[in-house]
Image (spheres, grey):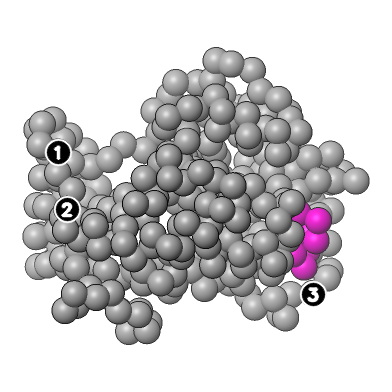
């Protein structure tokens, strides 16, 4: 019987590292997001990827059993299958709603699946998302990005310009949703911060959950690097005056390839989220993080999630 594992996210939580340097060396069939890394010599199964991603944009009631079987037949009868793609968790700009839709697809098509979910401390996650948003053309302030007005965070009602709804990053509610669908025993939750502090323990928890092994040392290839504050500040200013089409061209040709590399050498480290706003975010999630830590035995107090 084939075992299916789905690593669904979060983005900005070492997904590129795992997809590039770790998953391809495991003793299983890895069909997820691939990179052109030295260790990843296998061809990505583009037919499988195309079929699976087509499901992401359909409601579960629109998909027939034959469509799910077509994917499983394409995979074959391998003992262990791992699919990793952070888009499965959904888009923050629509409150991750499409991620919940995808969860039902996984359950319908692969009912005995096991889910891997990596979380990241919310204020750090939001900081990283905001930086990526600027890189993609966003020009508004961090408060606008957070729907923060008059001392409180507002609910995102879809009438937005790329903002995030903080209510959608309640890990206790998110993880409870996946538990209700797949069962607590089929859900592995790992804090991203554990990887930063104790990589070996983080990876052992992953391999134990999948009952596979890996051999050290892993590749030391770099994955995504963070753009500097000054570069992003300039880009945010420019984004206010130019079209999306020009933004993409300017970012790729000018900033990321030439000027951006020089600006990133400037030793000026600063966050867009102020200390006061960071405290507000931490207070917003404190009780929910406590409940998530207790229910899923995550010890989040050791990683700064709980104050």
Q: Is residue 205 left or right of residue 291?
A: right
Q: Disc 1 vs disc 2: which is toward the camera?
A: 2
Mark 1 Cα-neighbour bin, 10 Å: few <14, some 14–19, many ≥20: few
| Disc 3 secondary structure class | loop
Mark 3 Cα-neighbour bin, 10 Å: few <14, some 14–19, many ≥20: few
Q: Is residue 26 on the magenta stretch?
A: no
Nearest the eye: 219 or 112: 112
Q: CA distance from mark 3 to mark 1?
A: 51 Å
In the image, residue 46 lies at what x, y percent?
A: 64, 49
| Disc 2 secondary structure class | helix
In the image, residue 291 lies at what x, y percent?
A: 52, 60
Task: Please report the residue visible at 39 percent of the width from the left and 51 percent of the height from the top.
Answer: 306
In the image, residue 221 lies at what x, y percent?
A: 43, 24
- Residue 64's tag is 3
Q: Is residue 293 left or right of residue 126?
A: right
For marks 3 and 1, the one nearer the N-term is 3
Nearest the eye: 273 or 224: 273
Q: Is residue 21 left or right of residue 148?
A: right
Q: CA distance from mark 1 to mark 2?
A: 14 Å
Task: Please report the residue visible at 31 percent of the width from the left and 54 percent of the height from the top.
Answer: 123
Q: Is residue 274 left or right of residue 213?
A: left
Q: Disc 3 vs disc 1: which is toward the camera?
A: 1
Please, which residue is most extreme toward the right here? 1
Q: Is residue 108 on the magenta stretch?
A: yes
Query: Which quarter of the figure has residue 164?
Result: bottom left
Residue 129 seen in this snapshot:
no
Query: Which quarter of the figure has residue 137?
Result: bottom left
Q: Which residue is mark 2?
A: 275
Please, which residue is most extreme toward the top here? 217
Q: Which residue is mark 1?
A: 269
Q: Which residues are magenta?
A: 105-113
């Amino acid at each position: 019987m084939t075992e299916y594992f789905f690593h669904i996210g979060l983005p900005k939580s070492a997904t590129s590292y795992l997809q590039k340097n770790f998953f391809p060396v495991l003793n299983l069939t890895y069909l997820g997001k691939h990179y052109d890394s030295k260790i990843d010599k296998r061809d990505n199964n583009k037919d499988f990827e195309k079929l699976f991603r087509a499901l992401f944009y359909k409601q579960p009631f629109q998909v027939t059993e034959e469509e799910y079987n077509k994917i499983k037949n394409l995979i074959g009868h391998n003992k262990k299958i791992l699919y990793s793609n952070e888009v499965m968790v959904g888009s923050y700009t629509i409150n991750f709603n499409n991620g919940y839709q995808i969860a039902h697809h996984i359950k319908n098509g692969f009912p005995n699946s096991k889910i891997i979910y990596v979380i990241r401390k919310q204020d750090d996650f939001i900081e990283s998302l905001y930086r990526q948003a600027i890189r993609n053309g966003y020009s508004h302030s961090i408060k606008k990005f957070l729907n923060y007005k008059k001392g409180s965070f507002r609910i995102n009602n879809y009438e937005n310009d790329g903002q995030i709804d903080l209510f959608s990053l309640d890990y206790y509610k998110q993880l409870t949703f996946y538990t209700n669908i797949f069962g607590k025993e089929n859900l592995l939750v790992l804090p991203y911060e554990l990887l930063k502090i104790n990589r070996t323990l983080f990876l052992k928890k992953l391999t134990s959950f999948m009952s596979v092994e890996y051999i050290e040392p892993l590749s030391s290839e770099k994955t995504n690097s963070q753009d500097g504050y000054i570069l992003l500040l300039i880009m945010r200013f420019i984004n206010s005056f130019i079209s999306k089409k020009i933004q993409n061209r300017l970012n790729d040709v000018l900033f990321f390839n030439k000027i951006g590399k020089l600006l990133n050498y400037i030793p000026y480290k600063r966050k867009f989220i102020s200390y006061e706003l960071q405290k507000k975010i931490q207070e917003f999630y404190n009780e929910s993080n406590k409940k998530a830590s207790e229910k899923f035995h995550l010890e989040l107090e050791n990683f700064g999630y709980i104050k």
